[in-house]
Image (cartoon, rainbow, N blue to C red):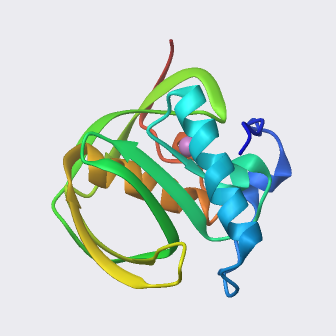
Amino acid sequence: MAIRSVVQVGDEVLRGKCQPVEVFDEKLVQLLDDMKDTVKFEQGAGLAAPQVGVLRRVCVVDVDEGYFEFINPEIVMQKGEQSGWEGCLSVRGKNGIVSRPMKVKLSYQDRNGEKHLLQAKGFFARAICHELDHLDGVLYIDKATHIEKC
Ligand code: CO
């Protein structure tokens, strides 16, 4: 387990499209364990694999509902709308207002390759949407209607 350095905006890896995970091996376990160390150390609400330089469809979310690992996640349903503040470990010193769905239903695999369905609302749904965007090279600053220094 190790803390990895978080790639900052301007680095092309953040704009890449991530490939699905097909092999659930020791390397994936190591990536997930390192991402956990990193997001806890950085006190983030989430972290996506491209933020540690890996173009794979892997992200983690750390919110009031708990700590979650999502592999090959896909939003299968979304409902409503919410507008609120977001930040990103790859865009230090800024926050922005972004519109997101109020509720999402997510399909994903865990570190063993088992499939799951999960429902999330409010900030949890926001965090999921933010991390999934990272997997397609999208940053919240692309969608924010207002950005402030913090
Ligand atoms: Co982010």
Q: Residue furthest left?
A: 80
Q: What residue is drawn where x is 75% and y is 35%? A: 8
Q: Is residue 118 visible?
A: yes
Q: Quadrant of residue 49?
A: bottom right
| Vertical position of residue 63 compared to residue 32: above or below | above
Q: What residue is drawn where x is 27% and y is 43%? A: 123
Which is more toward the observer, 71 or 103?
71
**In the image, is 44 to the left or to the right of 86?**
right
Q: Residue furthest top?
A: 150
Ligand 1 sits in quadrant: top right
Which is more toward the observer, 149 or 35?
35
| Vertical position of residue 35 compared to residue 21: above or below | above
Q: Is residue 17 visible?
A: no
| Vertical position of residue 131 compared to residue 11: above or below | below
Q: What residue is drawn where x is 72% and y is 36%? A: 3
Q: Quadrant of residue 125?
A: bottom left
Residue 60: x percent and y percent?
A: 50, 54
Residue 39: x percent and y percent?
A: 56, 38
**In the image, is 2 to the left or to the right of 148?**
right
Residue 71: x percent and y percent?
A: 53, 72
Which is more toward the observer, 28 or 57?
28
